[in-house]
Image: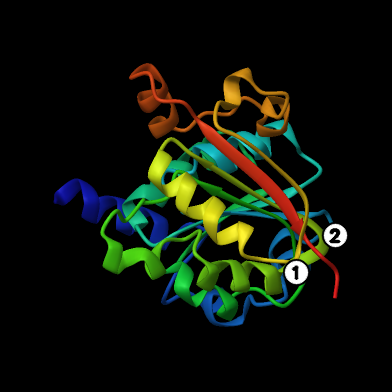
Amino acid sequence: MKSKLKRFEIISSRANVIEPGKELFETIKGKWNSVYFKNENPLTVEFACGRGEYSVGMARAMPNRNFIGVDKKGDRLWKGSTWAVDEDLANVAFLRTDILFIESFFEKGELDEIWLTFPDPRPRIRDAKRRLSSSRYMDMYKKLLQPTGFFRFKTDNTDLFNFTMEELFMRNDLIDFEYTHDLYESELRPECHDIKTKYEEMFAAQGEKIKYLRFRFKEE
């Protein structure tokens, strides 16, 4: 408990973590590039970022893009925040909020790309609407993405991947839709930059196949 409280204390004073109680938490919507990053580089968001391995990894690999990792657990965000501080990565930030409220923090069309990496599969049937790849959330992602922006999803969980595919197959607003049930043996692998989260490494070591899909929403 002391360790968790210490982490909360640390991120409360860090500029690269936007969380309740900080001024930017209430005012950042539509201003990520102009106010926080102070440039016009493309903006990528990772939802359910956990410790932030993916967000930080992409920030390392693509210094000419801006990245935001979003998660509601402050003790997890502490890790990614610390990596970014230690490596002086100015192109990555973290937002502490429940993804259900994400439209309060990004304007329509503000995002160039969205990643959803290894979210909680929520296996109970009654929790289907709470899955971050359900139609409920997809409709939110569509609002936030630019028309040319990709949505990208990785998981080890077969049931969640199949559920997501079923949700997407019911839509008529997708283009450039590609997917694989075995990322490491797929031509799509380079799109993921060979960045692996803690969970990806763990599940892959156990023999689980990593599933991946990506698409764009049709411009209306």
Residue at 40% across, 25% down: 208
159 on left or right of 15: left
Q: Disc 2 residue type?
A: Glu
Q: Is residue 90 visible?
A: no
Residue closest to the far left:
1
Residues under numbered marks 2 and 1 in contact, where contact means CB atoms less than 8 Å apart? no
User: Neighbour class for label 2 at 10 Å: few (<14), some, many (≥20)?
Assistant: few
User: Neighbour class for label 1 at 10 Å: few (<14), some, many (≥20)?
Assistant: many
Q: Position of residue 39 (x, y in %)?
A: 82, 58
Give whichever of 147, 40 is nearer the camera. 147
Q: Position of residue 62 (x, y in %)?
A: 75, 37
Name the residue carrying label 1. Answer: 110
165 on left or right of 99: right
- Quadrant in the picture for the C terminus: bottom right
Q: Disc 1 residue type?
A: Glu
Residue at 46% across, 53% down: 163
Q: Position of residue 58 (x, y in %)?
A: 65, 37
Q: Quadrant of residue 60?
A: top right
60 on left or right of 38: left
> Compared to 217, does 66 lie above or below?
above
Give whichever of 10, 100 is nearer the camera. 100
Residue at 70% across, 77% down: 107
> Compared to 77, does 15 lie above or below?
below
Name the residue carrying label 2. Answer: 40
